Image (tube, helix red, strand yellow):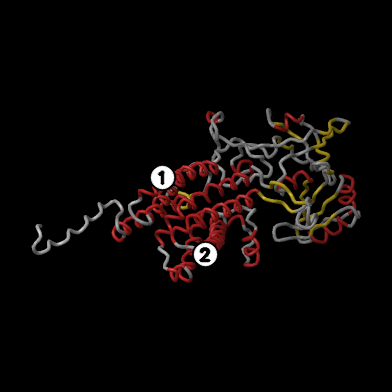
Amino acid sequence: MQQVLFTVPILQGWLAPDGLPLAGFGAMLFVAFVACTYWGVKRGGAVGLTTNQIYDLFTWVVLCGLVGARILYMIQYSNQFSDKSPAALFVAFFQIWRGGIIFYGSALGGAAGYGLFYWFVLRKLHVNTWQLADAVAPILALGLAIGRIGCYLNGCCWGQVAVEEVAPVPLGGAHFPLMPAHCRDQLVGGLHLQTSAGFALAPRDRRGPAADPRSVVLVVEPGSAAAEAGLKAGDRIMKVNGQPNGVVVEVFGETGEAVAEALAKTSPQNQLTPATGERSPTVYFPSYENYAQAVLATKTDGATLVESDSLGELARFWPRGRHDLALTVRRGAEEVDLPPFVPRSVGLYPTQLYETVSMVLLILFLLAYYPFRRHDGQLMVVCMVGYAVHRFVNESLRIEPTVGGGLTLSQWGSVVILAAALGMEAYLRRTMPSRWAAPAPDPVPPAQPGLPA
């Protein structure tokens, strides 16, 4: 998993603190587009399309496919988008890194895009759709093979927890850097299979109005990266990634905004974050002393204070592309700097790479079968059948919600694609000439008068 391959040191502080990030997922989408377009130029010439026409076709289909893929994701995982206003959903549509896309949505969007391109362009060029479909079938599988590598780099589309016996097997189980991984919420908060960073925290001290709320380690998982870094039970977190582990207070209640402003004004170092659609007003205190001074000097009637610290905030909004966690702890009377460590997930089936392998095999089969196809369009039928069967099985290794009959949305999509492929094959067998039929014998010229027959 490598959500950010590297950062380009331009626009630092504007787009991101370190510059412009190059995402692994986006890079693989670009590689897939370039590779598929290049191969499409080679194969598209066989059906009479020029290079520019191939460029236009692929660009239009890819854009429509991305739109469809993102829309279907937002429908299936609508619970991830708390703000359902049109403006918020429009903004969220472009934030692909917050979740992702679904292939069957791209198939629908791409099909719609091809339909429009055919109506306005290809039909005027008298291009045979079925011959074009056969030319595109292995290219579609190539795009899937490369795109799933992007999913693996992004950490999305993960599989179920792998059994221990498959650990020595290649691709038997993948351990993702846990803090930025999309699977963290499910593994930690949903299934309770592991802690967020290899250790658990003691309940916050609430015995007084200004008790220190900064995190104290309750227990460390044996064998975890945190344990190997030297973290111990009883350690109080003083710094996180080189920065002070400040106190963060979210203020609720009727007087929440006024109380938050009053807390922030007790020191110019305090920082107030106004309320948003997702959070109440929040105040950051760079030190425990700032927090204690503010709480003791401010009337909080009508408001409820919920204390956390920088570690909790960082875990909640972990930056993409960062894998390691460096802590400074207070142990007795001294502070100890621990080496950076990378918390990792339990082993998960790398279903993304299973699809890459499956699609490479499908490409080889399609190329080998092309000269032996019965009729035009049959290669696309084989591609659809192969992907539908693979996706149905591969989906059973993932942790996805069911939508009916015990099947996930993508499994139902596989059923639809398989049915469409079988229907397409039945139609083409009735309407397309067979290449398997023996060629008709040459007609015998009629005997001429006066010559022997």
CA neighbours of label 2 inside 10 A, class few (<14), some (14 to 19), many (20+): some
| Along the line of sight, the residue nearer the viewer: 229 or 354 | 354
Marks 2 and 1 in Cβ contact (< 8 Å): no
Q: Any mark on residue 368, and which?
A: 1
Instruction: Give the quarter of the figure containing the N terminus.
Output: top right
Of helix, strand and loop, which one carries label 2?
Answer: helix
Residue lying at 25% horizontally and 52% vertically, measured from the top left:
438
User: 233 left or right of 134?
Assistant: right
| Along the line of sight, the residue nearer the viewer: 394 or 30 | 30
Of helix, strand and loop, which one carries label 1?
Answer: helix
Please, which residue is most extreme toward the front here? Answer: 450
x then y, percent, for residue 20: 74, 54
Write down the residue under mark 2.
Answer: 53
User: 204 left or right of 88?
Assistant: right
State the image quarter where residue 375 is shown. bottom left
Identify the amino acid type marked 2.
Gln
Identify the amino acid type marked 1.
Ala
Measured along the vertical axis of the image, is residue 273 above or below residue 308?
below
Residue lying at 58% horizontally and 45% vertically, measured from the top left:
149
Measured along the vertical axis of the image, is residue 201 above or below residue 305?
above
Q: CA distance from mark 2 to mark 1?
A: 27 Å
Measured along the vertical axis of the image, is residue 158 above or below residue 9?
above
